Amino acid sequence: MAAIIVHGGAGAYDPGEEHERGLKDAANAGWAIIESGGSALDAIEAAIVVMEDFPIFQSGYGSSPNLAGEIETDASVMLDDLSCGAVGALKAAANPIKAARLVMERTDHVLLVGEGADDFARRMGLESRDLASEARKELYEKALAKLRAGEDVKFLPRLKDLAADFDIDTGTVGAVAIDDEGHVAAGTSTGGPVLQLPGRLGDVAVIGAGTYANANGGVSATGHGEPIMKHVLAKAAVDAIANVGAREGIETVLEYARINEIRFGLVAIEENGAIARGFTTEAMSWASVRDGELETFLSTGDGVRRKKKGKA
Ligand code: ASP
């Protein structure tokens, strides 16, 4: 029943070869742990760390700058016994998912944000890093130029009206795994949308919105954080899985997201080991491994889908 599935975010993008390589490396890193009898938690952490370190993904090193040109990351992790931890608006930690795990394992809290969270991560011995990659700096400059020209910024339609009040001169990953003992763990990590307001927390920092797990299974979500929070979609998906099983449950939640026009994607594993995934956006990507069989799925904004099977 042991398995892992990782995703590289839902949105409108064309996942190229680098993206595919990152997904495979992440899924293989997680699978290697599960295969050698390790825990689902260690597996998803290892998989997400690979993607956080890979500049192609919108998380860790590769996160998009906020309106002030700074990186602020969110991450969360949850286990099937309801243990969970999350961090929000981290500026320095190289691997936000490790900080989320340490919140779960070492503190009495569920969520740490901002300077306190960065300070905690440093005290726990986590590495700090300048998370701004060259590609994301370019993306930031382009988005900023649009905003200055009075154009709409994707996902942030009210930003135009706010921009005058700010001194503006100055993509997400996730994984769900089930181990040999049948334990499920889910985690998600993001830099949030480019030009988000400084201090914004998204669904990925909020347990139940971007990440959820319980005895019925686990989910990592991606997409437009604000409606995902309002509709608490990761928890909704786990509840649907409990009611009707992984495949049908996920379809129910995707249909709900479509009806409510929510840009959304998710990967899930049920407590019996069944994997499910899907999205309402133009594109999404994922890779999964079970019994040493690696399966990748990459969908592009123009409807092209590439599906491949191979050895982990
Ligand atoms: N859900 C993330 C956020 O809103 C973004 C994403 O999944 O791409 O912060």
Image: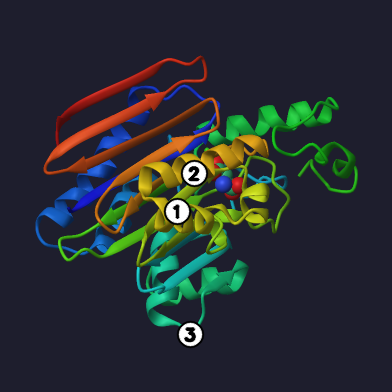
The residue shown at (32%, 58%) is: 45
* Residue that numbered label 2 is attached to: 172
Residue type, label 2 = Thr
x, y (%) of residue 179?
A: 20, 60
Q: Secondary structure at mark 3?
A: loop
Q: CA distance from mark 1 to mark 2?
A: 7 Å
Outermost residue, bottom side: 108
Q: Residues within 10 Å of mark 3 (few under 14, many from 20)?
A: few
Q: Is mark 2 within 8 Å of ligand 1?
A: yes
Q: CA distance from mark 3 to mark 1?
A: 21 Å
Q: Is residue 78 left or right of residue 271?
A: right
- Judge whether 268 appears above or below 117 on screen: above
Q: Secondary structure at mark 2?
A: strand
Q: Is mark 1 within 8 Å of ligand 1?
A: yes
Mark 1 or mark 2, earlier in chain = 2
x, y (%) of residue 124?
A: 39, 75
- Judge whether 173 appears above or below 282 on screen: below
* Residue that numbered label 3 is attached to: 108
* Residue that numbered label 1 is attached to: 188
Q: Is mark 3 within 8 Å of ligand 1?
A: no
**Discs 2, 3 touching: Cβ within 8 Å:** no
Q: Is residue 143 left or right of residue 180?
A: right
**Discs 1, 2 touching: Cβ within 8 Å:** yes
